[in-house]
Image (cartoon, rainbow, N blue to C red):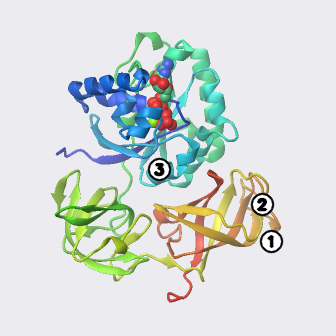
Amino acid sequence: MPTDKPHLNLVIIGHIDHGKSTMMGAMLIKTGAISDREARELEKLAKEYDRESWSYAYVFDRLKEERQRGITIDLAFRKFETNSKYFTIIDAPGHADFVKNMITGASQADAAILVVSGKKGEMEVGVAANGQTREHAYLAQTLGVKQLVVAVNKADAYDYSEERYNEVKDAVSDLLKNIGFPVKKIPFIPVSGIKAENLTEKDDKLSWYEGPTLIEAIDTFELPPKPTGKPLRIPIQDAYNIKGTGVVPVGRVETGVLKKNDKIVIMPTGFVGEIRSIEMHHEEQDVAEPGDNIGFSIRGISMEDVGRGDVMGHPDKPPTVVTPKGNWTGQIIVIWHPTAIAQGYTPVVHAHTAQVAAKFIELNKKLDQKTGAVIEDNPKFLKKNDAAIVKLQPIKKLCIEKYEDFPELGRFAVRDMSRTSCVGIVKDLETGPSEE
Ligand SMILES: Nc1nc2c(ncn2[C@@H]2O[C@H](COP(=O)(O)OP(=O)(O)OP(=O)(O)O)[C@@H](O)[C@H]2O)c(=O)[nH]1
Ligand SMILES: [Mg+2]
């Protein structure tokens, strides 16, 4: 899709079944990003699977299992344009079992639409202690998604009621404010995804609403600054073995600039090679900058040299690796835990696209969440809603950076029993000896 418009990655997040895929599918059909013909084919297919109301969602839900079960499992990417911008839409799953995919999506995003169903009972489940409206909002904030709009979805199912809209807005505002989002700046847009109302055009049934439509709201997202002057960092999202081309890693440039023929290094594998070609949206290009989602080919690389969670950089300023003998100091918030976190706790940590088990080797300080003041030194336990300074040690090599050097690679989330238990940033790190 050749275009001169500036590009943004937009992730769609929210609780399961709140209508993320449907709403964005309808938006793409309305704007013509999906052809009528494709839309009709999806309708037919949804009928075949006896899931007629999911036909718009099928724009994003392309796996057979997703279509049969009527849920999103993995991330789906689609392009689309507004008046002034060019978006890659990343549709994330709401299901609690697939939060790791949502994290991968959010870690690549510049902005998000938080979809909250206004249908009676549904909003309430999403913002509850273990709901994914809450969990996704926390994760989005930690992963650096700074701009947000909230779609108060399924307006047809709450009778286009202003009263109900306000109820949802109040509850979600409280939640977002606690997490640290600038709530006053966030538009709350009543929409019906399934009826494509207030997505691209205002609708009479929502005449009481005076704000922007969804497409107008996302068109006003600001472009993130491009840290082109920093060393190159590209977290690898995946690597494909493509017939005729060979191994093609894909990922988003977070910082720095990548050029064709550059000598690169992939950490922690240590593979050194040379960039043969760079591709974005199926078009070759000579240069990639922060924010670009690219695939690239490298001379002499094999599938063992690269995978999800690795980070690519230039050999003179390689990505930082913490080994199992090193550690990092994290400032964390415990957002959920069934009991309490103690020294020795070894959950899975997600940072950019990586996931690795890591051990809490020290609990250093408990902090006041609002002021950052130290409440307790060397606490024995950490519980839900505690803020703390802790030391973590990965059980295998992990690429991670100090937050102040590379915010994009200096955030992490702790997951346990298929749920996010903590979110945090890297205050300091000791790489540990490079050879074990
Ligand atoms: N009444 C009504 N139902 C909707 C609307 N949007 C979606 N739904 C229904 O809600 C169900 C879930 O829709 P999806 O789009 O798959 O929801 P999702 O948020 O993508 O779900 P996951 O990806 O699995 O988290 C389907 O039955 C949709 O038809 C809407 O605007 N109004
Ligand atoms: Mg979905």
Residue at mark 2? 382
| Tag 1 secondary structure | loop
Camera sees residue 196? yes
Tell me the kind of residue under disc 3.
Ala
**Label 3 lies in ligand 1 vicinity (Cβ under 8 Å):** no
> Considering only order in the chain, which callout, 3 or 2, is on the residue closer to the N terminus?
3
Question: Could you tell me which residue is drawn at 40 percent across and 14 percent down?
Answer: 203
Quarter of the image for the N terminus: give it: top left
In which quadrant of the rendered view does residue 202 lie? top left
Say above or below: 94 vs 151.
below
Question: Could you tell me which residue is drawn at 75 percent across and 56 percent down?
Answer: 386
Q: Where is residue 217 in the image (x, y as percent from the top left)?
A: 40, 32
Residue at mark 3? 106
Quarter of the image for the C terminus: give it: bottom right
Question: Could you tell me which residue is drawn at 54 percent across and 48 percent down?
Answer: 99
Residue at mark 1? 378
Say above or below: 273 vs 134.
below
| Label 2 environment density (alpha carbons within 10 Å; few <14, some 14–19, many ≥20) | many
> Which mark is nearer the camera, 2 or 1?
2
Say above or below: 184 vs 429.
above
Tell me the kind of residue under disc 1.
Asn
**Residue 377 relative to residue 234: left or right:** right
